[in-house]
Amino acid sequence: MIRPFELFVGLRYTRARKRSHFISIISLISILGITLGITALITTLSVMNGFGKELRGRILGAISHVTITETSGQLHDWKGTAERIKNPQVIGRAPYIAGQGMVARGKTVSGVMVRGVLPSEEMQVSEFGSRMIEGKLDVLKPGEFGVVIGSTLAWKLDLAVGSPVSLIIPQALVTPAGLMPRFKRFTVVGIFKMDMYEYDSSLVLMNLDDAARLYQMGDQVSGLRLKLDDLDAAPRVANELAEGLGPNYLARDWTREHGNFFRALKIEKTVMFVILLLIVTVAMFNVVSTLVVVVTEKRADIAILRTLGASPKSIMGIFLAHGSVVGVVGTLVGTICGVLLALNVEPIVHGIERLFSTSFIAADVYFISELPSDLHWSDVILVSSCSLVLGLLSALYPAWRASKVQPAEALRYE
């Protein structure tokens, strides 16, 4: 245990004297290394948290938290099923019809996923209504055969609001000339932009009744989409709903559809944490070398302290205090800098981009065009704790070496 005496002497050794400027410079370099490592680690983890949060929000803005369907793959009475769902965490319900097809405009054809929706219900479970850049989602009226498409698909096919477009579906139509694919001409009534290429380039929305007629579904739908107040509770809620509705129903949550993607982000964050922690570890090796030099230089002082009655434990405590100062100061300054940088990384990046007239994140390459940051205090505490532990461990060996110095050997040539 470090007592006031050991702490006082250890802090006294941290102050530079005329013959120990070199040691002080090495100590300063060690502190800077720890500071930079902690700053980089906190900032990187915050940016990765921001990316994960932004991507999850955009993906879940287009898909459902929980999907209810029957074992046959279709849902016969979606209104009755919706009324049977009494879970308080369910805050939105919307039926849908899912299908595949090809959109044709002149000689250009693009494969798409078709989703039949009820606009008033769909706004409860997705963000398409708030992501419209042209038109509105509620203009999808039954019988008018209008479609709402993504911005990338509109660009590829040169479509705008009011443009006619043909939709071909993979269902055969028997004619005297043989089997022919079924198709229907629609009118573009709206364009959305989710900032996710997967949806902007290949998703087409139409009214639920129009989709039922097109895919010959009758009164059936593909399923019921649910939105929860806590998306992390989706697996548990899905299991509860499946048990409550009966064996003929299936409940699927978003983690089964995109769980691998978010698990990969989590693993990447862990690996990045370990890699960047090596920067702090390298700085701690500088602390070890600095303390070894200090112990060598202070052998005579150690011998004098021993002859005055200081025990080996006291000597060890002195150099533990001396080494811990470097780790504590570096960790404290690095944590402050890391938190400040993580909280202001977006305006800083924007300023650098304006200064050099460049863009670090191209919108046509990445999912997003900004550098988001989401600071988690649990990450800050974890990083700071690891740094403090590494700082204490780096001081153990030099302090142990100092406690083994023999007064007679140290003063022989003094």
Image: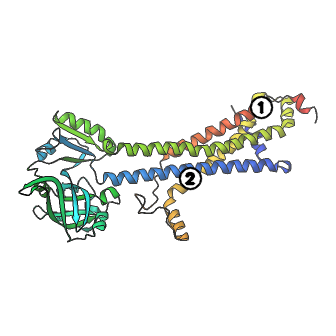
The picture places residue 277, in percent across and down from the top left corner, at 58, 43
Q: Looking at the picture, which amino acid does disc 1 mark? A: Arg
Considering every residue shown, the one lying at the far front of the view is 177
The picture places residue 76, in percent across and down from the top left corner, at 11, 44
Q: Which residue is mark 2?
A: 338
Q: Residue at x 8, y 49 (%)?
A: 219
Above/below status of 407 relative to 173: above
Q: Residue at x 21, y 33 (%)?
A: 243
Q: Which residue is mark 1?
A: 401
Q: Residues within 10 Å of mark 2 (few under 14, many from 20)?
A: many
Left or right? Give the position of 262 relative to 237.
right
Q: Is residue 172 visible?
A: yes
The picture places residue 262, in percent across and down from the top left corner, at 39, 45
Q: Say which label, 1 or 2, has the lower sequence index.
A: 2
Q: Looking at the picture, which amino acid does disc 2 mark? A: Gly
Above/below status of 308 relative to 209: above
Quarter of the rendering occupied by the C terminus = top right
**Count of number-bearing discs:** 2
Task: Looking at the picture, tell me which residue is in the foreground, 303 or 171.
Answer: 171
Q: Residue at x 52, y 63 (%)?
A: 349
Q: Residues within 10 Å of mark 1 (few under 14, many from 20)?
A: some
Left or right? Give the position of 219 relative to 34.
left
Q: Residue at x 22, y 48 (%)?
A: 225
The picture places residue 326, in percent across and down from the top left corner, at 69, 45
Q: What SS does tag 2 mark? A: helix
The residues tagged by marks 1 and 2 sit, at their Cα atoms, a distance apart of 34 Å
Considering every residue shown, the one lying at the far right of the view is 413
Left or right? Give the position of 218 relative to 90.
left
Quarter of the rendering occupied by the N terminus = top right
